[in-house]
């Protein structure tokens, strides 16, 4: 389900979210991270939705999109896990399962060099908030 910009603004307003990010801050952060690491394992939650999604992020989309058709302003948080298991192919007979690892301390250090962000580190994950 893709939300309209108007419905996103309504959710933000009604939820009394405090905003910690904007489009240019997201773009700068993700460009520098991708330049340094080539790709990142991420989990993310969008405002107004309960489902947590995960992917390997390796390219910064064109503004104002995080991952088209998702807008930056929809991102409630992004989480960088130390370890993530990814399953390729929905068809069981062709599935391959990979366990990926990334150094979240290195990611955290780079994020802190870029600027001031609302970060939380816990149990092998680093979470960056767009809203709280």
Image (tube, helix red, strand yellow):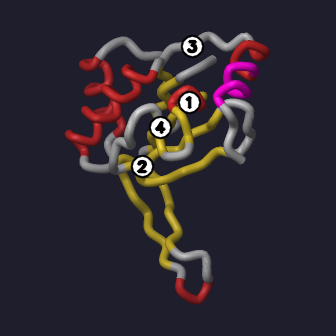
Quarter of the figure that contains the C terminus: top right
Rendered image quadrant of residue 46: top right
Mark 2 and mark 4 residues within 8 Å of each other at the beta carbon: no
Which of the two marks, 4 or 3, is nearer to us in this view?
4
Mark 4 and mark 3 residues within 8 Å of each other at the beta carbon: no
The segment highlighted magenta reads: 5-10
Residue that numbered label 2 is attached to: 41
Mark with earlier residue (3, 2): 3
Looking at marks 3 and 1 on the same chain, the residue that comes earlier in the sequence is marked by 3
Q: Which mark is residue 65?
A: 4
Task: State yes or no: residue 7 in magenta.
Answer: yes
Q: Is residue 79 above or below residue 42?
A: above
Q: Is residue 73 left or right of residue 62?
A: right
Mark 3–mark 2 distance (CA, rounded to whole Å): 23 Å
Residue 6 location, x and y as percent?
70, 25
Label disc, if present, on residue 13 of the rendered structure: none
How far apart are labels 3 and 1 at the CA level? Answer: 11 Å
Is disc 1 in contact with disc 4, using a CB cutoff of under 8 Å? no
Instruction: State how far apart marks 2 and 4 are (Cα).
Output: 18 Å
| Mark-to-mark CA distance, 4 and 3 | 17 Å
Q: Position of residue 15 (x, y in %)?
A: 76, 16
Name the residue that disc number 1 marks.
Answer: 77
Q: What residue did someone put label 3 on?
A: 19
């Amino acid at each position: 389900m893709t939300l309209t910009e108007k419905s996103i603004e309504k959710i933000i307003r009604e939820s009394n979210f405090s905003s910690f990010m904007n489009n240019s801050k997201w773009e700068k952060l993700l460009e520098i991270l991708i330049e340094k690491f080539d790709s990142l394992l991420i989990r993310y939650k969008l405002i107004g939705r309960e489902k947590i999604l995960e992917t390997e992020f390796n390219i910064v989309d064109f503004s104002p999109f995080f991952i088209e058709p998702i807008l930056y302003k929809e991102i409630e948080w992004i989480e960088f896990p130390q370890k993530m298991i990814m399953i390729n192919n929905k068809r069981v007979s062709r599935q391959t399962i990979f366990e990926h690892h990334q150094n979240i301390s290195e990611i955290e250090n780079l994020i802190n060099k870029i600027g001031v962000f609302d970060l939380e580190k816990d149990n092998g994950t680093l979470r960056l908030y767009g809203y709280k």
